[in-house]
Image (tube, rainbow, N blue to C red):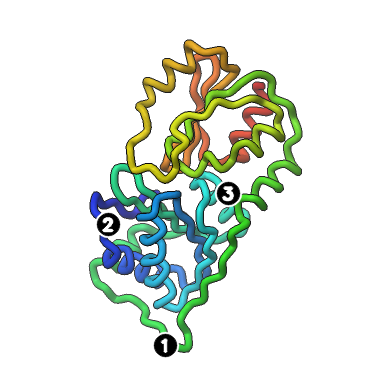
Amino acid sequence: MEIYRSEEFNPEELALLGRAIGTVAQGTIVVGRDGRAISRYGKRALVVGIVSTGSATMDVRLIPLIVLKDFAHKRGLPLVYIYYYNGVRVEISGFDPDEINALLKTRKFIEAHPNDIGATVYYPNALDDFLQDIFKHYNFTVEGKALIDCMNTPAVLLFPQLSEHLRFETELLNDMMTSYLPPKPKEVYLQKLKKGDYAFGLRFRPDGYVEFHKDGEEKEFGSMWRLLDHMKKVL
């Protein structure tokens, strides 16, 4: 769920949020980000706050949020993800948001001794490892061409590996993951999908959900595994 949103970049607020999250977690947290520079710097502020409480971070760096949710769930770890979409936003999973917000009000954060500052482990191959898990599990063939709206998120990094493995063609829209410009509206995407010769469409939203479009119907998934289960049934 979304725990933070700001139209301005405020690293001090993000560091405080990190301290609250680290105080609640007291363990290892998976952290990731989207492709904007502001998210890279914001993630650093979050991590500084988290490790100051003694909690550790597993930094998977640039990754789609929908993939990070599956990645963290498999490992039984909470997650923190920072991205830009009409402002700076932070998503969390595996935490009690009320507990985090209460700590932000009281500022009663755990302050670790210098010897107990949390460690950061870097895991830059998280996306590749996730895709390999997917490929071991799914080996069906998809006929036709898909219209993929990446909505300027790191979902663009799923292609062409995913489409090559399932053997379908793609046309990508809004694939500039470093851009701060808002993606084209959903209505533009749906109009193009309706007029074109596409077998189906995928629209990867910044909030970590993907819309599956086929024959005028839309389904929403918060997991790549559930999406692929559905694709296997209907394509």
> Which residue sits at x=33%, y=68%?
15
Distance from the alpha carbon under mark 2 to that under mark 3: 28 Å
The circle on residue 113 is: 1
Task: From this view, report whether residue 110 is shown above or below residue 3.
Answer: below
SS class, disc 3 = helix
SS class, disc 2 = loop
Amino acid on which the number 1 mark rests in the picture? His
Distance from the alpha carbon under mark 3 to that under mark 1: 33 Å
Classify mark 3: residues with Cα within 10 Å, few (<14), some (14-19) or many (20+): some
Q: Earlier in the sequence, mark 2 or mark 1?
A: 2
> Which residue sits at x=37%, y=21%?
187
> Which residue sits at x=51%, y=58%?
61
Amino acid on which the number 2 mark rests in the picture? Phe
In this picture, residue 127 sits left or right of residue 188: right
Amino acid on which the number 3 mark rests in the picture? Asp
> Which residue sits at x=62%, y=57%?
125
Q: How far from the left and from the top, in percent, is residue 26?
A: 47, 73
In which quadrant will I find the C terminus?
Answer: top right
Label pair 2/1, CB-CB below 8 angstroms: no
In this picture, residue 88 sits left or right of residue 134: left
Q: How far from the left and from the top, in percent, is residue 208?
A: 46, 43
Q: Which of marks 2 and 3 is nearer the N terminus?
A: 2
So how many labels did they put on this image?
3
Q: How far from the left and from the top, in percent, is residue 97?
A: 36, 57
SS class, disc 1 = loop
Q: How far from the left and from the top, in percent, is residue 111?
A: 36, 81
Q: Which residue is disc 2 drawn over? A: 9
The circle on residue 70 is: 3
